[in-house]
Every structure is written in C-alpha cells, then in structure tokens.
Amino acid sequence: MHLLLLLLVPILPFTAGLSINPGHNKVIESADTTSTSLIGSTVTLDYRSFSGLKNDSTGIIYFRGVRFADAPIGNLRWREAVSPPTKHLGNVDATQFANGCIETPQSTVTAGTSEDCLFGNVFIPINTTVNDKLPIMVWFHGGGFQEGNTHNAPPELIMHSSAKPLIFVSFEYRLGQFGFLGGHQIKEDGVLNAGLLDQRTALRWVQRYISKFGGDKNQVTIWGESAGAGSTMFQLVAKGGDNEGLFHAAMGDSPSMSFTPQFNQAYDEGIFQQFANLSGCENKATGTLQCLRSASSQALTLAGSQLLAARPSTLFVFAPIFDENFITERPVEAFKAGRFSRVPVLFGSNTNEGANWSASLKDASANTSMPNATEVTVFNFLRGQYASMAEDSFSNALDLYPLQTFDNSFSLQGQQMYGEARYICTAAMITGAVSKTNKAFQFHYKNPHLGSNHGAELDAFFSPPSNANSADLDLFEKMREFWTSFVTSGTPSSKDKKLWTPVDDASGSPRILLQPGGITMENLGSLSSRCSFWHGLSSEIQT
C-alpha cells in the first residue's frame, strides 16, 4: 500500500503537496511537497547508513543497534564517550539488538554483553515522512546502575496507544564498575559518572540526528524506571540545572534516590582501591588507573562481581557520584534550592516499593526476612544502602514507623522505610519542587490483583501478564494514554477524559491513584511528614 501511494503522488495532480499522517494512514495537506518522502527502512547519517526492519503488521520500522559513540575501551575507559563515531563502516544491518553493557553481577563476559555497548534503538511509525517532526520519547532502563539493557522495552504497546504518532528511542549506558567507579585518580585523568555522561551523549546524538528519522529535536521527553528514573532525576539537576536544551520534559517511574558520596571520600576511594586490587592492579600507586585501562574486559568483569560479593549488605555498590563537575549538588539540596532544569515533569511510584529488597541480601545481619531479625537488622539494612546513616536518626525514624503498625514485622517495617526513603518520597520531592515553576504530575500505582512492588507498573507499557483481567488491561491502556499524551502534548490525558490534576503543593500533592476499577486523585496525607524527615537527613545520608 505504501509503495502504491508513493507511485500515485507524482502523477495525480490533486495529490501534490500531500503527506501521509504517520500511524493513521490519512492524507493531510502540507505546504511542502518534499514531505511526501517516506523515511523508509534505511537512514543515512554522516558516519554510516542503518538499514532497519519494516514490519507491516505492527506498523513500525525498527532500527536496532544504532551505534552512537565509539567503543569505550582501552584508553577510552572512564572517559567521556566519543560521539559521533569516528569510523565510517558503510551500511549497517540494524535489524537486531547490539550488545548490552556488561552487568556488575557477571563474573564473565557473556554473549550479548560487551564493553563496546554504546548503542541505541529508534522505532518510528511506518509512514513517517522526512518533515513530520514527531515528538521523541527517550527511554533509559533501570537496574540499579549495575544491571539492565534496552532489549526488554518493546515499543509496540506504547506507540499503538498514543493518540498522536511519536518516536520511541532507547539507549544503553555504561554500568557498574565501567560507568560509576569513583576516586580521585579517575577525576584527574578521566570522567566520573561515565554512565550518566553516556546518557547525555546519547541526547546530543538525538539533537544531531533524530530529524533523519522524522523526529523533532525540540520535542524530546526523557523517561526511565528505577535507576532509569534516577537517571532522569540526575539529568534534571546536572550542571546546576543546565540541560543544554537536550530535553523538554522528563518522566520517571520510581526514581531512585541513591547514596551519592563525594568522589574523593573514603567510601569511593575504598571502592576504587578494592576494585583495583581485585583486578590485579594492586600496589600501582599513581599508575593504578593506567593498569586498569590496560586490563582485560574479563579481569574487570570478574573484579566487579567479586567486589559485590565482598559487600553483602549493600544492594548497589556502584551508583552516581557527587563529582563536582556534572553532578555539582546532591539531588535533595538541588531541588530545595531550585537548581534544576525548568521543564514539565511526570513522576510517581508504586505502593510496595520496598518489598523484597532486604530479603535478597546475603548478609544475614542486614536481612530483615530472617526469623531472628530485630530493629538492629533493620538498621543494618538501611545502613548498607546509606553508609553514613547514624543510629540516632534511625531511632527517630522508628517513631514515624512504629512496629505495631506493621503487625510487629521487622521485614514490613524495613521495607516501608526503604521504599519511601528511596523511591516514593523522591517522586513527591521532584514533582513538588517543579510545581512551583512548571507543570508537574505525580502518580501512585496500586494494583491489589497483580501486585504493586517495584517495577510492577512496567507491565502496562511492555508486557502485560497473562493473568491480567479486564480491569487490569483497561488500567494499562489508560496509563499508556497518559504517558504518551504527556510526551506529545505536555499534559497527560486519556480517551475517556479522566482528569489528572497537576501537583499544586510543595509536598507533591495531589497525585493520581492508578488502580483497577477506579482512577482518582488523592493527597499524600501523613506521607508528607515522613518524606520531610528523610529529606531532612540529606546531608547525613548524602542524598
């Protein structure tokens, strides 16, 4: 059909100056006759051509494994990514995913992972034309800054639910020891937070090249979940709020407020030296970093997994660092002071964000699911995630989370503390701060049927489970409509005109309650005082 339309355009007088509206197969007027040129399945950039996969059944052209930077290996380890790529390799088959980045728990470099992992994926409506200027939705995956990749974020449900056509883009970024290793040696001869800088490099790539795919570089919304949402949070506050015009709205599901130590504090210096020792670079003094850059990928991969095993009370050893260049201020203080990018935001969290985290720890003294757990176990769990937390502060927290409220379960008490401190209160903080200067929307996902643990809301966007009932599926469709309309219009809306009231209070109220069978607005209530407590500890726990 699309070939037929292309053949008809030049020979039928009444079709001159028309273009195909992507995703809707309607003919609309256009002042520019060149707008009838479809993007097609091959896009040529100034450093190579990419041939993607055209799928008539989904109505999407898939460009996978699009290199956006040189391989960050050897002397490019712990340096800012080089983009655009410096080598021209002709025409590239972009029908399959490229390698994901090496994950910290890996003990070997497994198939499908590599240090050479700076690739993106671009998914466009099949009828996109060169002048459509479609809005862009950029996805950063989660995984605690130590795991994850773009391969489990299929675009079909999101793109099909959008009332207006959009382009979905996802990028890999360096993880763990390759993306978030601290220490003064890296500061002096490299870059800290290489993983966050990879994301910014990817966004610069979007500015330079997305028009070749029919996208509008002035309508870019960044989105992520967990560490991906933490990433969008850090992108908001990076460089004192200077986003370089790289994005125009930000979204985040369960934004992660991680422990953010200064690069040269004992915590990060200790991790650097421990990692160097495990990598075979002990006793190298000022030559340690050179040794690490000369080491094999396998040696560095094994060392990362060994380092995690040596710190069994900590969930995420590697995470963003207060580096004084890119991250010039920790998030809580930045949002309090108003030093963040002035763009609309949509952030939120799930009811049971803190569930199961402690139970995954190998250190029994910090595992609150153990039958002999006590308040000390809960403290050890929290201290494992926020290494500078004081016992007095924990004692004060107990007043806000009395044990009897949780059926005398230390596990439930600990999970509520952690879920609110790390995720729930972070969404409230971001939306409350942004509401003073721009549109801000907050959500609360609660699904008693399928569960409301960390990451559960992603079922709506990528993979509804087989046991989802009609109420679940109806909720999922509305959520996709909300998210995509925010990308395309700046305001979340649904086909049934369900109203999502923006945040109008510094606490983050009101927020929308997304639950099967009844979406409604709610206030934060007593949650606000607990969030104020956690954010009041920001200097102590380095958030």
Image (spheres, rainbow, N blue to C red):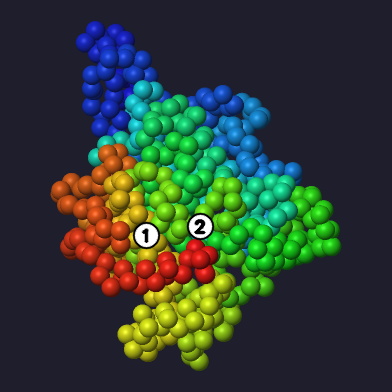
260, 103: nearer the viewer: 260
Disc ID at residue 429: 1
- Res. 132 image quadrant: top left
What whole-number distance in Å separates the C-alpha atoms at marks 1 and 2? 13 Å
Describe the element under mark 1 as helix, strand or loop.
Answer: helix
Label 2, on which residue? 330
Mark 1 touching mark 2, by CB under 8 A? no
Query: Does any portion of residue 269 appear in the rendered image?
Result: yes
* Residue displayed at 55% across by 61% down: 260
* Residue displayed at 30% across by 46% down: 438
Describe the element under mark 2 as helix, strand or loop.
Answer: loop
* Residue displayed at 69% across by 46% down: 190
* Residue displayed at 31% across by 46% down: 437
The answer to whether 10 is drawn above or below residue 272 in the figure is above
Image quadrant where one finds the N terminus:
top left
- In the displayed orientation, state which residue is furthest to the front: 337
Check disc 1: other Cα within 10 Å, few if <14, some if 14-19, many if 20+: many
The kind of residue on which mark 2 rests is Arg
Whether residue 425 sits left or right of residue 300 in the image: it is left
195, 185: nearer the viewer: 185
* Count of labels in the image: 2
Residue 119 is situated, as x and y percent measured from the top left of the image, at 56, 41
- Res. 91 image quadrant: top right
The answer to whether 323 is drawn above or below residue 403 in the figure is above
Residue 41 is situated, as x and y percent measured from the top left of the image, at 45, 29
The kind of residue on which mark 1 rests is Met
